[in-house]
Image (cartoon, helix red, strand yellow):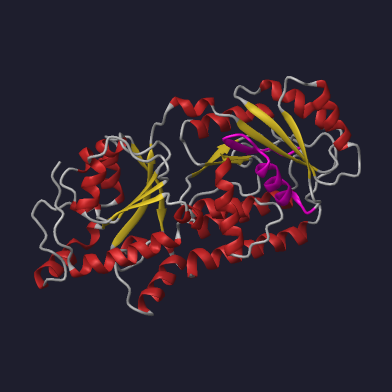
Amino acid sequence: MTNNFEAKSYLRKKWESFFLNIVNKRTPDQSLKNNEVLVLDNSDSLKNVLQKKTLDTNIKLVVISIPLNNFENLVEFFYKINDIFPDETKIIVNYYSILWTPLFYLFSKIGIINSLKKNECLFSKKILEIFLQSTNYKISHYIDEPMIPFNIPGFSKILYIISNMFPFLKFLSFTKICYLQKRNISSDFANKKASIIIPCKNEENNISKLVNDSNYLEFPYELVFIDDKSDDSTLEKINQEINQNPSKEIKVISGEGLGKYKAVKLGIKNATGYYSMIFDADITVDMSDLNLFYKAISEGRGHLINGSRLIYKPYAGAMRILNYYGNIFFALLVTYITSSKVTDTLCGTKCFKTSDLEKFDEFEEKNKIFDLWGDFNILFAASFYGLKTIDLPIRYRKREEGETKMNKRFFFFKNMLRTCFKAFIRFKII
């Protein structure tokens, strides 16, 4: 494979420094600390990797600062790295936009960049997808890119904020940055255990059904109940089910009574599954639907599988009118903030790798977010750190037993708005 890697031009050096700063901001501290990030910033580092038959499986993120425009045979390159990088390794790439071809030719004439060759390939999103469709890679997630490929103090920041406020201006950007992930991954992931995280607060009448419904699951699992200081017989019911079902892997964790998300995180920290699935104890979603979530994540369709109750029409009495339109409002707001389509932000059914809790915690801590339910923080963190989120349509039924915990609607609405505001600052301003 031959590549067009030359000495770096002035603009290339400026862009590379700017690009790596952007990527660094989007990389979890834990990944950097654990040396899970590999940066390929020149032809020698790239050649060294391509000469290896295997790569350290510790690498979770590969950053290629060499623009894709510089590759002589991009399809061949993607074929080679497919055999080198582990299935779950994400790759960050960048390219110069075809929109600015005349300006790049001008820059090449005055020496700001290296002379453009007649066979130089400039990209659009569609052109990149054409290259990728012949490979095992697909675009996972785009990062909000700067308008210009270098930093002009003050001016670049203003352009960045304006383009974030008005996303339709993004087509004017000189450069594009995106995550790639493998399209098909090993079937071994379909044999990994999932921990079903079930936060409970006064759900005594639903415990037995939850355990019985787990018989419909078609993958290896454990049930992790978190009793969040119930004042009914929820804890007794869970322990009774544990005693009556010795063949099932069931555990109960004592919660702190500080809300659903605190309980969920406590459950995940005590989970032993490779995947974690959050499932509400109100059984408004069929537990058998978790088979679809497991299939989606184990086949590599996404990194966060987010249940959506608003694609199908909810069953009568399942959701109050005000809640329904509130969900639509927040779905539009979260979509705007993250630039990633989300159709339901408050569905309690979600699935992700258990180890990704570290990313969610880091986003929450760095941005001082206090999300009582956790759904917003998970969605924002996943988008910020490049996890592909997909919505999985599910049926939403009326609660049959117990009482809804979403009873302080104005208080919860303010909490959700506050969370969205902090995420807005993180995504659009900083």
Residue 129, visible in the rendered structure: yes
> Which of the 4 image quarters holds residue 214?
top right
Residue 331, visible in the rendered structure: no
Above or below 210: residue 350: below
Residue 45: percent from left, percent from top: 24, 51
Residue extending farthest right: 232
| Residue 246 lies within the magenta run | no
Above or below 358: residue 215: above
Query: The N terminus lies in which quarter of the figure?
Result: top left
Q: Is residue 218 left or right of residue 282?
A: left
Provide the residue span drawn in magenta: 258-281
Residue at point 62%, 30% (across, down): 290
Above or below 399: residue 30: below
Residue at point 42%, 45% (across, down): 60
Closest to the observer, 146 or 248: 248
Residue 29: percent from left, percent from top: 49, 58
Residue 421: percent from left, percent from top: 60, 66
| Residue 273 lies within the magenta run | yes
